[in-house]
Amino acid sequence: MSKKKLNVGMVGSGFIAKVHSNAFRQVGHFFDIPYEVVCKVICGRNQEKLDVAASRWGWSEVEIDWRKVVARKDIDAVDIAVPNALHSAIAIAAAEAGKIVLCEKPLAASLEEAEIMTKAVERVPNLVWFNYRRIPAVVLAKQLIAEGRIGQPFHYRALYLNQSGNDPSKGNTWRYKRSEAGMGAAGDLLSHVIDLAFYLNGSIQQLSAMMHTFAPGRDVDDATLLMARFDNGSIGTFEASRYGVGCQNRNAFEINGSKGMLSFTLDDMNQLDFFDATEPVASRGGRRIAVTALAHPYGENFWRPGHVLGYEHPFIATLGDFLNSIARQEPFHANFADALAVQRILHAIERSSASRGWVNADGQPA
Amino acid sequence: MSKKKLNVGMVGSGFIAKVHSNAFRQVGHFFDIPYEVVCKVICGRNQEKLDVAASRWGWSEVEIDWRKVVARKDIDAVDIAVPNALHSAIAIAAAEAGKIVLCEKPLAASLEEAEIMTKAVERVPNLVWFNYRRIPAVVLAKQLIAEGRIGQPFHYRALYLNQSGNDPSKGNTWRYKRSEAGMGAAGDLLSHVIDLAFYLNGSIQQLSAMMHTFAPGRDVDDATLLMARFDNGSIGTFEASRYGVGCQNRNAFEINGSKGMLSFTLDDMNQLDFFDATEPVASRGGRRIAVTALAHPYGENFWRPGHVLGYEHPFIATLGDFLNSIARQEPFHANFADALAVQRILHAIERSSASRGWVNADGQPA
Amino acid sequence: MSKKKLNVGMVGSGFIAKVHSNAFRQVGHFFDIPYEVVCKVICGRNQEKLDVAASRWGWSEVEIDWRKVVARKDIDAVDIAVPNALHSAIAIAAAEAGKIVLCEKPLAASLEEAEIMTKAVERVPNLVWFNYRRIPAVVLAKQLIAEGRIGQPFHYRALYLNQSGNDPSKGNTWRYKRSEAGMGAAGDLLSHVIDLAFYLNGSIQQLSAMMHTFAPGRDVDDATLLMARFDNGSIGTFEASRYGVGCQNRNAFEINGSKGMLSFTLDDMNQLDFFDATEPVASRGGRRIAVTALAHPYGENFWRPGHVLGYEHPFIATLGDFLNSIARQEPFHANFADALAVQRILHAIERSSASRGWVNADGQPA
Amino acid sequence: MSKKKLNVGMVGSGFIAKVHSNAFRQVGHFFDIPYEVVCKVICGRNQEKLDVAASRWGWSEVEIDWRKVVARKDIDAVDIAVPNALHSAIAIAAAEAGKIVLCEKPLAASLEEAEIMTKAVERVPNLVWFNYRRIPAVVLAKQLIAEGRIGQPFHYRALYLNQSGNDPSKGNTWRYKRSEAGMGAAGDLLSHVIDLAFYLNGSIQQLSAMMHTFAPGRDVDDATLLMARFDNGSIGTFEASRYGVGCQNRNAFEINGSKGMLSFTLDDMNQLDFFDATEPVASRGGRRIAVTALAHPYGENFWRPGHVLGYEHPFIATLGDFLNSIARQEPFHANFADALAVQRILHAIERSSASRGWVNADGQPA
């Protein structure tokens, strides 16, 4: 009995398109999914680069005009892997054409776009690639919180640091231009941090933020700092920076609760640190959990206990869960609505930074 | 040839008085000092506790009334190791009596007191026990910064977390009462963090802060968060909390600069992490420096390379440096003026938290 | 221009067959190879399991009899992923049929078999899956040694610990039976350790070993310890155990040389620790190198700096290098001859353990 | 009520004499002891050095001839802090004079001497400074083992590495001469490791060892390796080296048992790692216990939770326990008999290394 084919059209051919391509290629190897994923067409503006990508990853066809991809009847899903400012038009057109829509984060270059996009996809299955939600250690953190293992949360503390902004070879790409990216470190890095905060600790009520640009003449933030109050009564500090020299990809969070602490950093993505404050004092301590056991999230999908995962596996898991959610008609997260909530916080951050005061989650003065 | 005697009168008999006593007892064993330190009199309100402390640490006499200690002609130095609200009267009286004055941190329970105290001690040698400045790893960080090893600073990130506030056995001591402590986590913990920031990264220009109390009915902050701009162009995030469950005494800082990163945590106080971004990419990485070599700060004073120091050694080093500075008539830091600068920031934090906006270092709206 | 097809027949359908399948599927995505790898036929004894594996990984055909696979003219390469005692017959038949031969480690269940196999494959391209040689951090260690960064080696120290032997659910598989595995921890775990030692530190001259079985009635070693002298004048300690409770997959080595130290553990496979003893004392320390930069081994093949690899990537790199070596007619390692050298040491270990004395690398009394 | 005076005469004025002096000075500050320890006389061959030491540490008198110290009626205890080959004569004379005898490790330069010394001290309280037994983390390890927390031990793995042998400034001291030290790394470093193994894991039954000298012309071992069988059925690997470049004072052990693992390293002496294999798989992991709580060994003696200890504190604790054991007429360990057991193993190691075979604990071929 053969599976239903799912023809994918991907718009984009850069680094993240490579990562998505890998997920499409690998998802069937590690997840029981009700579709045969077909890498049908890859779309981009550079023909040569496109041919290479198609050949390397086995996309059957190449296409220069994304509108043609969206218009094709034989395409079931459109995946958007292009700079932020281009997300909106493609997502809306794809949704209107009834396609399943997958979109890279951050959802859009502005809150307005994000709102329109989210409305547009209401009737189609939709996903935003907040991949870090599906790191096994992060899912385990979520489970431990849900089980009450850390009790009432007091502090949420997160940062995402890389050193790209200080690197002359990178500072001139689309990520450093407001017209193409919308924001700098906030959109690129902090969006992940905020999404994880929502996932793990719930909604943010109020915040006070500072956006800062170190490089002269650059029109996006190089670093964004904020303090926040969560609906659950905890308070948070956040930091995202492209001037975190010494850190290549440090996406980390810590939560202190009445019964314990959780710590995670992407540098050691196969590990979760858990301090159980309910243990007897003499033998308690922060446990370094190697989150690779069969009993762990996605433990049955990939390798064996003690056999670590890499950067790409959470993308594969995201896609696997998404495809199953479609078939089962179950809700999937992070979807466009989830990403819109993140975008609202990014917007509120801009408002707070400009007004130098506290704002509510909707950006209004608090 | 015998050394000049330095008769010390100590006011206080609690935990920190024990730590100071140890410093007085040990300083001559590890530092070449021009005095014979004499533990002359220990003063406190509880006679029984006092007798025990005197007997244990070899204080020759005990005294109930600190005014008598200050008035004694044979006392050369007065050390203040009592709750914050009591610092002021003792320090002023001791200074007026011409004594050398040593005072536990934070300097006072209010900015007003701190200002008066600082003025009062202008003509006598004075010290505030910001002990963490003399951890060898912290001094090494200072040296590396001074040598330009991390280049232009971008980010300063520091926190001090313990879990005392969440501990029913502790929440009722003087440290949790505004009348005796002045502030909560801010005075107790953040004062150290701010002092180290001054020491390592210079003055704070502006800040926005949030003070928060988790425990119902408590009139001091359980946690204080802030964002700051430094005079050197870097930006900072700070956090101090007594609800950092899982952390017993985590006083940590990180600095990202154009050429490298420094990281320190009191949990591993004999180590300093240094990432040198000027090294070739292929072999660069964060170095964990065991700061125990003879070539390191205080390396000649204590043990041998690889033989670690403990909590009390920075107190001994503080005292050793102070006594030598007196004899050589050289400036000593941290003194009352340094501690006053910290107190100003604490005051500005209170203002910012109350007004929910940015303030300058003097507490005025920015 | 289409590439030459390379039709692969794989014998085996267990865990390691899954890992190999993944390598065949992924190699073209990350390596420029001169072949189109075709997953032609998968062979195993359990039809149901075979069908699942074929469907999951896209093997075009299934086959019960490995002799038929080897005999097929359209098969270019035979990959052996079955229990150790079965390697020999398949490898010899495949080599005689002129196939490219890939074989899981350890090469064989006995030295005699290994010798015959190695002779048999002399005229065909051959590979043994000593995958850990191609962990970027391990290759970087090799490069640093070659550059003289650790100077003259003094100590080589390695261990490989898991806890499988103490796990009732595992103790009854083929890996715990002499008839199928040949050896226990020595063949399973120590073979990797010895191969890495050869790769990084050269040949072993003499050794004294102890093999030990904790489980009553088991006829293979649960743990093997040895001391060794290397040809380069350094001395080594080795340990492999299935009773390393607390360790799931700890494959670690350390080398102390006159100029520095290297440390690696598979638990943190994206990192290499390097202590450069030629640095000034005050700022030297063990560097934790995140081996994910473009300048690092395989840095251009997989993701971006700071984007970590997982368990499967070294297998992909092994295959990528092998396929290129065939096309370029260049030597490839680890091949059967390399694996035979490991097998000789395993044999010498058995002799030493039995005789309770030192032996040479050939197993003769030293 | 004043305490009984305990007049101490110390023979030695080098580094370890400084450490012992500190212990005598500090013991009364942290331990309730039934004596007033009096630093009466310090004895050494270099008058100038002696005067400095006496002045620095407050020894009332200096003496050139140890025989005079031993002969003094007013001396209650003799502490031996001189090179190994001198221990024997002093210890025997002191014991014959009825003194309490404290001796630095290793006990002697030869097994013969150690046996005579041990016999000589039978009637007097005696101590050997195996200080690492009283690191709180080590005592906690002992407690956890006694409580059955790691179950049946399988593996004991220990090493002690420094880099002194490769340091031209050190290679010419008494520690590198057979006539003064007896042995090299084995006596200096491995003696600690063996003592801890006895303390934590019981007696060694059989062993096979290799002693190795890297430096041409040196007549003691630079490194010693061994494999061992313990009476409790576990097996062990040991390594001590002065060529462990990159390690300054790494004294580490690991124990794998049926229910868990313990790991310790002197580099992080305030921490003990404990893996509890009886925890549910999903949330288990190696716990890093900060061994500074009041509930921990010596937690009431020194500072507060989260306030770390340094190199000297285990010496103070050793002395505190010893003085109390004398007053209570209770057994004390490590005493001369314990140190003799270590010396027997060192002797067996020499035999095994020479014969290149396994030996029993008594050095006879096994």
Image (tube, coloured by chain):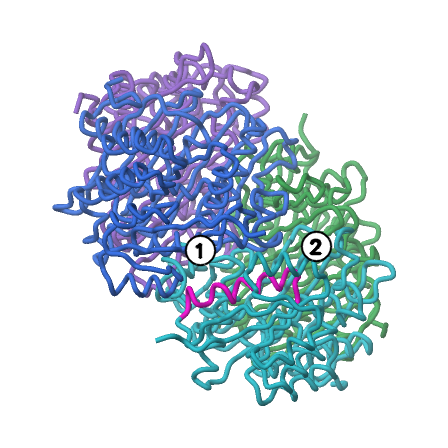
Chain colours: A purple, B blue, C green, D cyan
* Number of the front mark, 2 or 1: 1
For this orientation, the residue located farthest to the top is: A217
Magenta segment boundaries in residue numbering: D12-31
Task: Give me the chain letter of mark 1.
Answer: D
Q: Which quadrant of the figure has residue D340?
A: bottom right
Q: Which numbered circle lies on residue D356?
A: none
Q: Residue at label 1?
A: D308
Q: Position of residue C249 (x, y in %)?
A: 55, 58
Q: Position of residue D363 (x, y in %)?
A: 74, 83
Q: Position of residue A204 (x, y in %)?
A: 23, 34
Q: Is residue D142 at least partly visible in the picture?
A: yes
What whole-number distance in Å separates the C-alpha atoms at marks 2 and 1?
25 Å
The correct choice, above or below, for C160 with respect to C99 in the image is below
Residue A282 or B18: which is nearer the viewer?
B18
Q: Which amino acid, by three-letter code, is at mark 1? A: Val
Q: Position of residue B65 (x, y in %)?
A: 23, 52
Q: Which quadrant of the figure has residue C347?
A: bottom right
Q: Residue at label 2?
A: D163
Residue visible at 35% across and 66% down? D295
